[in-house]
Image: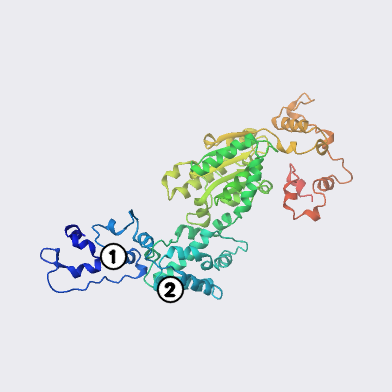
Amino acid sequence: MEANKCYPEARDLTYAEFSAKFVWKKKEKCWKPRKKGQSVGRIVYAHPSCGERFYLRLLLNVVKGPTSFDDIREFNGTVYQTYNETCAAMRLLDDDNEWKHAIDEASYSSSGRQMRQLFAQILIFGEVVDPKKLWNDNWKCLTEGFIELQRKLLNMATLDMTDTQLQNHALSEIQDLLLQNGQSLLNFSGMPTPDPQLLKQSNDKLISQELNFNREELRKEHEIYFQGLNTQQRDVYNAVIDSVYSRSGGLYFLYGHGGTGKTYVWKSICTKLRSEGKIVLPVASSGIALILLPYGRTAHSRFKIPIILNEHSTCGIKQGSPEANLIKQTDLIIWDEAPMMHRFAFETVDRTLRDIVGKDNPMLAEKPFGGITVVLGGDFRQILPVVPRGSKHDIIHATLSRSKLWNYFKNFKLTQNMRIQQQSSDQLGMNASEFSEWVLEVGNGTLSFNDCEKEESKIAIPRQLLLQPTRDAIEDIIASTYPDIQRNCYNQSYLEERAILTSRNEIVDKK
């Protein structure tokens, strides 16, 4: 290049032709014009798998008189970023049709593993011009068999995998084959490489379960749910979604009495995030409540919360376990019917999440729940934590609102009773607004009493809301709540809409 700057006649020579006209002076360490003798120049061979070295060699055979590396990459006034792009612009490259036809032909009779072996052999021994394009055109037949294999390994008959996961598995196997032959995907220009973290996730059963959703169906469901959100519900939805996207670790409490659409908000958020491949863990404090959550679990089951709790309890999740790996990948936790859980349970989960997430990022150990966005929901007018032989003061002190975590939560309130609006007065036996108001008065303790001593008074339930008993009151309740139960006992929506509650376990044990 320096000689090309000094000698105009050198600018008409290619790199291979240069030694025929110039000679290298060892002592002076420079090129001088040749005065006698002859020499035939040659360029050291470079295999196509050498990547940019191969394309540089091609260009040195045609580019004349370059004075810099930019000159080698220049064509028609444009300096390209790579030698590969320059060769393509100068039409020095053949296509890879022969390799594409070979892969197409083999795909009719070969297994997925055999196809991946063939692809690796083509990269190693074939002169592939554009490995990335060859991969992009053929990756589907190179990923065959992985879904069946993962279903067997994880024991999940309905497991599905995304295109990204399939490609990652195929690339990992091809990389192993190349390494056995002293090569690597990094040696082939443009070829993608496997993501170890994604590969680890797809081999984790718990994470695979939380990602095994039909995203297209969820998108359609979300569109329907989103259109039905009222103003109050949409405020909660936007706050939670923004927190997940920004990874700000927001904490929210959704307060609303029965029928205001808390579950509807949960479903709207779940379908939105799951359709985008994010992990949402919906849990509930009771088995009845979790039935309404999409693929929900009880909080004790999900977080392994101890039965006996104290101020220093931790969950039974160990570092490095599948449950811990799932928590590290979690984007959102939804906890329904939170007021009925003892405050120690939330503090126990908080300590555990900080410990698990904080191992990789110590800064997150200082944030509540390890920086994971958490949204709780419920109604403090309903069942509060059960404190054996506890007084009213003991029960109130055990509630979430008395926890040190409560100050971190931002409160939202739903007041519009969506359930009542969807029912007719005939179904309720009274005006819908009157029924809603009566239920709230019971919950708020503001219902008028006829007795003088309010604490000892009994609430009079309107007669139109009562069943008229025949011979067996319990049989009447069951028949009214679960009509035609034998035909609908496996119908999820039928069971979600019905429940019989009792104040004492002895009533449950009667049947």
- Crowding near the residue tagged with mark 1, few <14, some 14–19, many ≥20 C-alpha atoms within 10 Å: some
Camera-side mark, 2 or 1: 1
Q: Is residue 203 visible?
A: no
The N terminus, quarter of image: bottom left
Which residue of the protein is positioned furthest toward the bottom in this rendering? 109
Q: Give the structural element (helix, strand or loop) at label 1.
A: helix
- Provide the residue designation for mark 2: 121
Which residue of the protein is positioned furthest toward the left in this rendering? 27
**Marker disc for residue 92:** none
Of residues 124 and 402, the one nearer the viewer is 124
**What residue is rendered at 77% in x and 29% in y?**
457
Residue type at mark 2 is Gln
Image coordinates of residue 17 in percent, x first then y, are 23, 68
Residue type at mark 1 is Leu
- Provide the residue designation for mark 1: 60
Q: Give the structural element (helix, strand or loop) at label 2.
A: helix
State how many labels appear: 2
In the displayed structure image, the side of residue 59 where residue 148 appears, left or right: right
Q: Quadrant of residue 132?
A: bottom left
Of residues 411 and 123, the one nearer the viewer is 123
